[in-house]
């Protein structure tokens, strides 16, 4: 094997090691590279290759750099935990395997809850999806339909309730999921609680959100079921799907018409 091929092999093996550790749930990987440095040399060494890899975007999905340990003869890679809504993709593309179907189902309920609860509280839903985003490395997304720009205290309260709803829904589907994937939602909720002077209302709003999720669970399930098939739902679709599940006699026909029009425009 030529020298440059050997160095490429070092990078490949190291990347495979941290990717496999990420998938298996390991906490650390010890990569031994020896003491040789590339300083004064015109070619890389195992040490410089591994350290370069750990600084590169290729390693970002799999390690927590602030917790990694560099030593003269080795590198201890701290492995990033698998977030419920962050699924690592390989170098050949981005996708979710059959083994991740459970995560998709949990995520679909999480995102559906955001949309449905917002609709039931402020009478408008946002776009929701479970389309993976490679740049953000996220599996699910829900968009605010302009509620937070209204300046209305009632709208902002509804926004906070919808933020908490995602976590409640995923825990109903899978209690072991805990707060996985809820970090951004909780941060946004905390921000608005602070701005509105409602910090002391957090526990009550969380409880109210849970009560709403339970009340509207058939609607959340219906939206999640559609998400698993279509991957994306517009705000109008979320609202009509919820209305159909709630027993609105006219909503089913309205949904059919909407999709006929959307299909024709597309």
Image (cartoon, grey):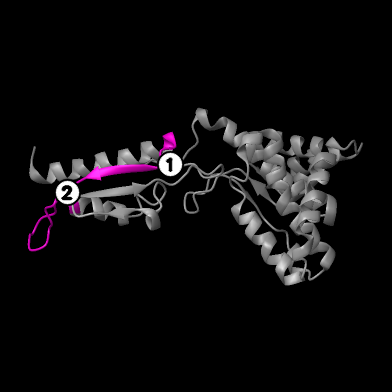
Q: Which mark is residue 89?
A: 1
Q: Residue at x 81, y 41 (%)?
A: 242
For the residue labelled by badge 1, is the local secondary structure a helix, a strand or a loop?
A: loop
Quadrant in which the N terminus is drawn = top left
Rendered location of residue 124, percent (x, y): 80, 55
Q: Which of the 4 image quarters holds residue 12?
A: top left
Q: Residue at x 36, y 43 (%)?
A: 28
Q: Residues within 10 Å of mark 2 (few under 14, many from 20)?
A: many
Residue 38, magenta (yes or no):
yes
Residue 15 is at least partly visible in this image: yes
Q: Residue at x 59, y 45 (%)?
A: 180
Rendered location of residue 210, percent (x, y): 78, 45
Q: Which residues are magenta?
A: 23-47
Q: Which of the 4 image quarters holds residue 56?
A: bottom left
Residue 106, magenta (yes or no):
no
How many circles with numbers are drawn on the protein?
Answer: 2
Residue 254 is at least partly visible in this image: no
Viewer-proximal residue among 60 and 65: 65
Distance between the Cα atoms at labels 2 and 1?
25 Å
Predominant SS of the magenta segment? loop
Viewer-proximal residue among 177 and 220: 177
Q: Which of the 4 image quarters holds residue 17?
A: top left
Residue 237 lies, with reference to residue 101, above or below; the image says: below
For the residue labelled by badge 2, is the local secondary structure a helix, a strand or a loop?
A: helix
Viewer-proximal residue among 13 and 248: 13
Rendered location of residue 219, percent (x, y): 80, 38
The residue that disc 2 covers is: 46
Q: Are marks 2 and 1 in contact (CB under 8 Å)?
A: no
In the image, which is nearer the foreground, mark 2 or mark 1?
2
């Amino acid at each position: 094997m030529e020298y440059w091929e050997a160095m490429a092999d070092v990078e490949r093996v190291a990347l495979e090691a941290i990717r496999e550790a990420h998938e298996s749930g390991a906490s650390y990987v010890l990569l031994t590279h020896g003491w040789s440095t590339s300083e004064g040399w015109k070619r890389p060494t195992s040490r410089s290759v591994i350290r370069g890899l750990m600084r590169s975007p290729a390693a970002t999905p799999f390690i927590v750099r602030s917790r990694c340990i560099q030593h003269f003869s080795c590198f201890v890679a701290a492995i990033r935990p698998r977030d419920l809504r962050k699924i690592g993709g390989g170098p050949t593309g981005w996708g979710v395997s059959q083994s991740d179907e459970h995560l998709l189902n949990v995520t679909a309920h999480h995102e559906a809850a955001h949309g449905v609860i917002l609709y039931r509280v402020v009478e408008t839903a946002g776009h929701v999806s479970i389309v993976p985003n490679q740049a953000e490395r996220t599996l699910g997304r829900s968009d605010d339909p302009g509620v937070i720009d209204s300046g209305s205290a009632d709208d902002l309260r509804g926004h906070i309730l919808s933020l908490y709803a995602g976590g409640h829904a995923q825990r109903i589907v899978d209690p072991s999921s805990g707060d996985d994937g809820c970090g951004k939602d909780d941060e946004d909720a905390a921000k608005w609680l602070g701005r509105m002077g409602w910090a002391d209302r957090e526990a009550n709003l969380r409880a109210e959100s849970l009560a709403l999720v339970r009340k509207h669970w058939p609607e959340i399930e219906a939206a999640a079921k559609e998400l698993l098939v279509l991957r994306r739902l517009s705000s109008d679709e979320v609202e009509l799907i919820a209305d159909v599940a709630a027993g609105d006699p006219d909503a089913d026909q309205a949904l059919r018409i909407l999709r006929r029009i959307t299909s024709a425009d597309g």
